[in-house]
Image (cartoon, rainbow, N blue to C red):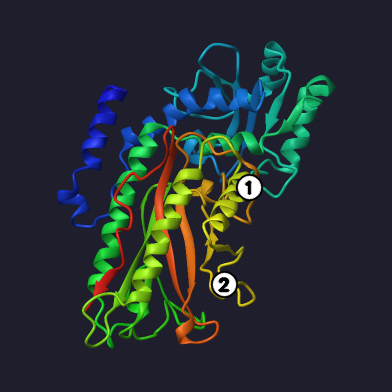
Amino acid sequence: MSKVKIILIFFCMLFSVQGLIAQNEEPDADAELMFLIRSEKFDIILPQVMRDNKIDMWIHMKRGEDPLNFELGSNPGVFIFTDRGGNRIERAVLGGRGDRKLYDIFAPESGLPQFVSERNPKRIAVNYSEENSGFNTISPEDYTTLVKALGDKYAKRIFPADFLIADFLAGRVMSEIALFGRLSIISAEKIEKEFDKIMPGVTKLSELNGNVFVRDPDGHEENNTDYVIQRGDLIGLLHGANMMDFREHNGGIAYVLREREANLPPEVQNIWEHALVTREIFRKHIKVGPTGGETLEILIQKLEEAGYTYIDRDEYDRNADPEKTQVHIDFHALGRIISQELAPRISPSGWGRDLKIPLYHTFTFEYMIHMPVPEWGKGEHLYICIHDGVMVTERGVEFPYPPCQGIRIIR
């Protein structure tokens, strides 16, 4: 089956909401889809990230569990990728096994010195890190063995591969984007089904699936506890969907009407309006190219220009202007599970703040709004958490599914 045909079939599955998605089932991993993702990552993403990082050869020594088991295969061995010009990166496995449809060369590990000298790379990336990145996966013994095998000439050309690996994982191919959209739809369906279960005064947070929470006007949070949901509660619920090494999780918000309430009270409607205003600020100013940290600084400036107060923790700041609504941001990656933490991150914390945002970066619009309600008393406020899956395209930030449309009313 051709790659084009597989993509077309998968997009048909993505938008077929009746059946599988309507039944809220977890999708099974399709072998052809998984192969397509692996092969496209090698064909499209790998040449780009090796050249962006100025790497001629990437040596990844893998012995056991490894962050790249999905991409490279689960077998141990020395995986070597060499840029020899052209549109394709040469792929070799020394001392191990791999998919013969993905790799060009299989040879004994003892041939590594000759293999490297024949290609004479100027910059060699190896899977170690000088930072706490999570990509320092080569053992000290293997690193010593590798340095000795390469000899003085090539050992001096070794560089950490952590940024290369992070860029390789963060680069998205179209089949990954399709999968991201499909999982997003399933996740959103799950959230609605959980909200359907709520009976005010009866249902406990712990009886709902997902990450369920309620905050009172003082900021105290009940999270997946035996707290019984009451009328007047503003409920946040995060829920996910998975397929093999891929995960997406979204958020929803619900309000439980009080007696004699027919619609959202004004303060609840107001905080939702703030969610829409800030959403557009974020969509307008997140672009391909800058790092996560640089983007955060831009967003902080734009939020403050719009009259908001940025807070670097998800906690109401009682020392800030009491009339301004406060906003916290944590736009972390979604998709490949390993890259959620070790990927571009628009956030006040995290290793990925220093990584550039690539084209088709898939991440979450996770932002928290703390809106003061002065008539309730000093420091009293409402809280909601927005959590929608998005991606950055040539046109800016786009949604692969309908994002949260409003605050769900529970009667």
Q: Can you tell which mark lies on residue 146?
A: none
Residue at horizontal 56 percent and vertical 74 percent from the top: 316
Q: Residues within 10 Å of mark 2 (few under 14, many from 20)?
A: some
Say which residue label 2 marks: 315
The answer to whether residue 79 is left or right of residue 217 is right
Return the disc, 1 or 2, that comes first in the chain's sequence.
Answer: 1
Report x, y in % for residue 127. Answer: 66, 37
- Report the residue that reaches farthest toward the left: 18
The amino acid on which the numbered mark 1 sits, given as a three-letter code, is Gly
Give the alpha-carbon distance from disc 1 to disc 2, as whole Å: 21 Å
Q: Quadrant of residue 157?
A: top right
Asked whether residue 258 is in view, the answer is yes
Q: Which mark is residue 293?
A: 1
**Mark 2 residue type:** Glu
Rate crowding at label 1 as few (under 14), some (14 to 19) or many (20 or more) other CA atoms within 10 Å: many
Compared across the picture, whether 176 is left or right of 189 comes to right
Q: Residue at x 84, y 23 (%)?
A: 152
Instruction: Say above or below: 83 vs 381.
Output: above
Depth check, front residue: 121 or 344: 344
Q: Is residue 244 left or right of residue 118?
A: left
